[in-house]
Structures are given as structure tokens and as C-alpha cells.
Amino acid sequence: MHALFQLFQQNRQFSIFSAIMLFVFFMFLISWLIEPRRLINGMIFTLFVFLFAIWISLLVFATNLKTLKAAYTLVVIGILMLIAIIAAFSWLFFLWNAYFVWKYESHTLPNLLTLFIGIGLIITWVIAITGPAKYLPNWLNILLTTAPVIAVYLLWVMYNFLINSFLYQFVPRRYNQDYLIVLGAGLIDGERVTPLLATRINRAIQFAQKQVNKGHKMPKIIMSGGKGPDEKVSEAQAMTEYAIARGISPNDILLEDKSRNTYENMLFSKEVAKKDYGNYKFKAKFFSNNYHIFRAALYAKMAGLNANGVGCYTRFYFLPNAIIREFAGVFVMNKKRHFIIISLITVFFIIQAIFAAGGIIKW
């Protein structure tokens, strides 16, 4: 500890760097606590982690402890090797996951996403190893570079989405809510809740009971979900019957049975709560599966509903497909921004290819 204080006293640059790192951390913390539904939170958090890694490295190598330096170097090398191994064999993980999804879930196109990604990664590795680009003209190679650059951009966007989704799981619960909104899902035979939907209802009931045990009032549970074309009753009605069968009083349940998607879940549930409460100053939480709550929170923000989500457990093998679908949904929500960036990348490489074909530049 004494050596650490000496380092701060003797090295002004290290002190300034430490102050910058702490500033970034508190900037992230304040932004996340005020509004955890901001995509920029993931970027600020990543910047903090990057600065913290540099700070730890500077601190370790500022000491005269050879054993500590050697151990730290081995840890860093181990982490880098692990990342490289994961990247190299990620195709194997996706194919393994596709097998379990195929075995335990319905054989729909969305459930085959990891299979397609696994096959795509194998093709990418084959192309990288065989190196067919060396047989193509220079201008065409430049043009084809557009694809990996766009892929890197998409990976960054997905990484930021994953970081935000992970951080969102830790939003404070705050057991003082007026309403608990349960988001609907499909029904079995058009009239019974699915196991997935049951976990959402059970989680809301558990939350309500814990809130009462903490000495607060019983929140009202809003069952949110309309009637699909292949359903005999609305999802809200089926969810209500399920909750009543588990001891919830009908007086503590409100129905929102018009919504057809997550955005409408939020928009219409907000109006149901407002009508019951008298104004928009109520406190609310919504409930869905853990992989879905961040995207649902973005829809809540769009709908003007001041509510954060509580996630329910999801079987591990189902997560990769579900997370990919969630990413696609969030990507589409911000499609204009992504379209502009991808278009700029494409135009840049087209111009470079034209210059290369005309002999103006060389790559």
C-alpha cells in the first residue's frame, strides 16, 4: 500500500490517468443508474474496462516484484489464448448448440440460427485458409474487403448489445411497485399458458409476495397479451386463469388484451395502469425472460413507460438462438443509423476499388 501511495506521489501521469479512469467509471455508473436503457452505457462501460486493464498493467509493472510481474504476464497470455481458442472453435459451439435446439425445440427457422452461423463460420475459415483472394485482381480484393469490415462493425454492435443486456440483469429491483406487467407469449392449444410464459407469471407472483413480506402493499399484476388468430382466448385471459389458480386474487389482476407485440404490451399496459391509478406517476416493473428484458425495456422507453424489467430463468441451450433474435430486433430498431454507417463503409471501398482499377492508388 505504501508503494502505491509513492507511485501516485512520484508519477503525476499515473495520477492523471487514474483520475480519468475514475471519471469514466462514475460517468458510466451515473448514466446507468439514471437510465439503464441507454445503448451508450455499454460503450462507456467498455471504455472503463479498457482503462482499468491499462491501469492494472501500469500498477503491476511499476512494482519491483518479479513474481507478480511473471504471474500477471501469464494471466494475460492465458486470457488472450482463451479468446483465440474461443474464436477459432466458435463454429463448434454453434453446431453443438444447434443440435440441442433441434433435439428439444420445434424445428422452426428462428431455432436454426445457430446452425446457419456455425456453417457460415466453417465457410469463413475455409476461405481464410485456402486464400482464394490471391488469384483475384487487386481492385476486386479491395471491393471484397467491404464484407469483413462490415462484419467487424456488426460484431462491435452485437458486443455492445451483449454488454448492455448483461448489465441490465443487475438493475435494482426496488420492491415498492404499484404494478407488475407480465408480457404475454404464445399459448398451448390456443388456451393454456406455455412453460415459458408460466415462468414469467411465477416470477411476478414471487416478486409481489416478496414486496408484501417487506411491508409494502400488494401490487396489481397486469396480464398483457392479445388474442392471436390461432388462439381461442387472449393471452391475458389465459395468464389470469393461471395466476388465480396459484392463489392470486382476481381483484389484484388487471387485463390488457389488445396488444400484438412487445411495443403494444408496453403502450397499452401503460394506459391500463394510468386508468386504474389516475395518472402516470405510478411505479411499475415488467416481467419477461432474461434474454428479452433489455429489448423490452427499449420498447418501454419508446412507449413512454417508466419501467424496468425483471428477467426469468431460461434454459442455457435456448439462449444463443434467443439472444441472436434479440440482437436482430434491437438492430432493426436502430436500422437507420446502421444503414448509414454500413453505406459509408461500402461507398469508401467502392471508391478505393475504382481508384485501384484506374491505377491511381495501390493497396
Image (cartoon, rainbow, N blue to C red):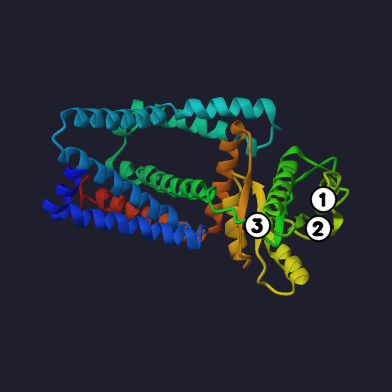
Which image quarter: residue 281? bottom right
In the displayed image of the protein, which residue is found farthest to the right? 232
**Residue count near mark 1 (Cα–Cα under 10 Å), binned few <14, some 14–19, many ≥20:** some
**Residue 85 in picture, x, y percent from top left:** 38, 27
**Residue count near mark 2 (Cα–Cα under 10 Å), binned few <14, some 14–19, many ≥20:** few
Q: Look at the image and tell me in which quarter the C terminus lies.
A: top left
Residue depicted at 11% across the width and 51% down the height: 10
Three-letter amino acid code at the position of disc 2: Asp
Q: Look at the image and tell me in which quarter the N terminus lies.
A: top left
For discs 3 and 2, the disc positioned in front in the rendered view: 2
Residue depicted at 71% across the width and 46% down the height: 206
Does 296 sit left or right of 150 as displayed? right
Q: Secondary structure at mark 2?
A: helix
**Residue 24 in picture, x, y percent from top left:** 33, 57
Residue depicted at 68% across the width and 36% down the height: 108
| Pointer 3 residue | 285
In the displayed image of the protein, which residue is found farthest to the bottom? 279
For discs 1 and 3, the disc positioned in front in the rendered view: 1
User: Which residue is nearer to you in this view: 80 or 115?
Assistant: 80
> Mark 1 and mark 2 in contact (Cβ < 8 Å)?
yes
Q: Secondary structure at mark 3?
A: strand
Q: Which mark is residue 248?
A: 1
**Residue 55 in picture, x, y percent from top left:** 25, 46
Three-letter amino acid code at the position of disc 3: Lys
Three-letter amino acid code at the position of disc 1: Ile
Q: Earlier in the sequence, mark 1 or mark 3?
A: 1
Cα distance between the residues tagged 3 and 2: 15 Å
Q: Which mark is residue 252?
A: 2
Cα distance between the residues tagged 2 and 1: 7 Å
Compared to residue 150, the image places residue 90 above or below, namely: above
Which image quarter: residue 261? bottom right
